Image: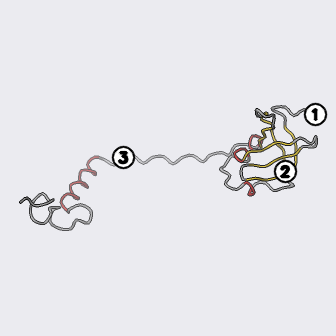
Amino acid sequence: MELKAGAIVEGRVTRIMEFGAFIEFPTGESGLVHISQVAHEFVKNIRDHLNEGDVVSVLVLGRDEKGRLDLSIKELTPAPVEPPRPKRLPRQAPEFENKLKSFLRGSGGFGGGAGGGKKAGGGKGGRKRR
């Protein structure tokens, strides 16, 4: 039996590597489920999802240029429903922002203390001229 793209087949996990799992079919042929094709969410450790000896259903995606089978478990499971994103808060009114800026200027900024934000020495700061 020739395994073609689009076929759904059951196979046994024979070996697990960092990059994916090898699946062997009753025909004796085997293929790879890449780690990106295991689940819809990010998979850091494939062993959290698969173990050697597990029997899994896979979708045959096709063959690579060397004739090896590319397989997917993810394509056979429904995609999770994403929760709605929170709405953005509206921008503050310009009057509030102006009052806040005025307050910060008058108080010397964040942690500036008293003195209206002026530096010691009465000048613009920096090095003194000779």
For disc 2, the neighbor class at 10 Å (few under 14, some 14 to 19, many from 20) is many
Residue 16 falls left or right of residue 11: left
| Alpha carbon separation for disc pair 1 and 3 | 63 Å
Front in this rendered view, residue 86 or 117: 117
Secondary structure state at the residue bearing disc 3: loop
Residue 32 falls left or right of residue 90: right
| Alpha carbon separation for disc pair 2 and 1 | 20 Å
Q: Residue at x 80, y 39 (%)?
A: 59
The disc, 2 or 1, on the residue closer to the chain's N-terminal end is: 1
Q: Quadrant of residue 124?
A: bottom left
Residue 70 falls left or right of residue 109: right
Secondary structure state at the residue bearing disc 1: loop
Disc 3 residue type (three-letter):
Arg
CB atoms at circles 2 and 3 under 8 Å apart?
A: no
Q: Is residue 94 above or below residue 102?
A: above
| Alpha carbon separation for disc pair 2 and 3 | 54 Å
Q: Residue furthest bottom?
A: 113
For disc 3, the neighbor class at 10 Å (few under 14, some 14 to 19, many from 20) is few
Image coords of residue 20 (percent x, y): 75, 49
Q: Residue at x 21, y 68 (%)?
A: 113
Please give the residue where the numbered disc 2 appears in the rendered image: 13
Disc 2 residue type (three-letter):
Val
Please give the residue where the numbered disc 1 appears in the rendered image: 1
The disc, 1 or 3, on the residue closer to the chain's N-terminal end is: 1
Q: Quadrant of the C terminus?
A: bottom left
Front in this rendered view, residue 93 or 76: 76
Please give the residue where the numbered disc 3 appears in the rendered image: 91
